[in-house]
Amino acid sequence: MRKRSRTVALAIVGAASFALAGCREEQVDAQAFPDLESCREASTTGGLFSVEDCNTAFAEAEELHVETAPRYDSLQVCEEQHGEGACGSEAQATSGGSGGIFMPLLAGYLLGNMLGGRGMGAQPMYRSADGRFTNANGAAFSSNTGRAKMGSGIFARPAATVGKPPMTRTTAASRGGFGSTGGSRGMGFGG
């Protein structure tokens, strides 16, 4: 009976190791840009992306921004989360949006070469009140420029916020502030 217990235990440990190895997130080459022109310029000097890639990815990121940017019930609450001058009304950012709902302004774009023939991923970036940058999923970044290898999960489609009730000071505080969940996943970019 003892020999069988060891065999079962070893099989369980082996299966757990295999499962954990299979759960490792795919790493992709990513590059962040403060604006479209920076991406286009980098495409001519050895950047990861072509001019066409930049144009396509930026259009995708801007579409995601309109659909998924965090929304707040006042300019003051938005600026508490993203910094003074880093917010505008939904009406300014979207056609038909509300003038009483506020969202962060775009502060950059994150592009990634997705492996396995899945093309490219793009995410809008926002300034956070602490001077760092976040995407709509709350992942934190030290800068909105540079290159890095990062998990493909960074490029997961964020939940839609358009048409949902905006965050109040209380709901933003209960979340620990926008982007706080990404604090443990903070990323930096190299040159």
Image (spheres, helix red, strand yellow):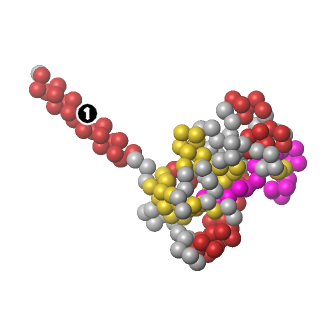
Q: Residue at x 22, y 35 (%)?
A: 11
Q: Which amino acid does label 1 sit on?
A: Ile
For disc 1, the marked residue is: 12
- The residue closer to the viewer here, 191 or 138, is 191
Residue 24 placement (x, y as % from top left):
40, 47
Q: Which residue is drawn at 46% across and 66% down?
A: 117
Q: Residues within 10 Å of mark 1 (few under 14, many from 20)?
A: few
Image quadrant where residue 52 sits: bottom right
Report the label total.
1
Q: Report whether residue 69 is seen.
A: yes
Q: Which residue is drawn at 83% across and 39% down?
A: 76
Residue 3 placement (x, y as % from top left):
11, 26
**Quadrant of the drawing holding the N terminus:** top left
Does the stretch in magenta take in 109? yes
**Left or right, 24 with reference to 74:** left
Work out whether 142 lies above or below 95.
above
Where disc 1 sits, the SS reads helix
Residue projecting furthest to the right = 99
Residue 155 placement (x, y as % from top left):
56, 54
Q: Report whether residue 136 is seen.
A: no
Residue projecting furthest to the bottom = 44
Q: Residue at x 26, y 34 (%)?
A: 13
Residue projecting furthest to the front = 191
Work out whether 135 lies above or below 117.
above
Does the stretch in magenta take in 85? no
**Quadrant of the drawing holding the C terminus:** bottom right
Residue 187 placement (x, y as % from top left):
54, 49
Q: Give the range drawn in magenta.
A: 91-110
Image quadrant where residue 189 sits: bottom right
- The residue closer to the viewer here, 103 or 36, is 36
Residue projecting furthest to the top = 1
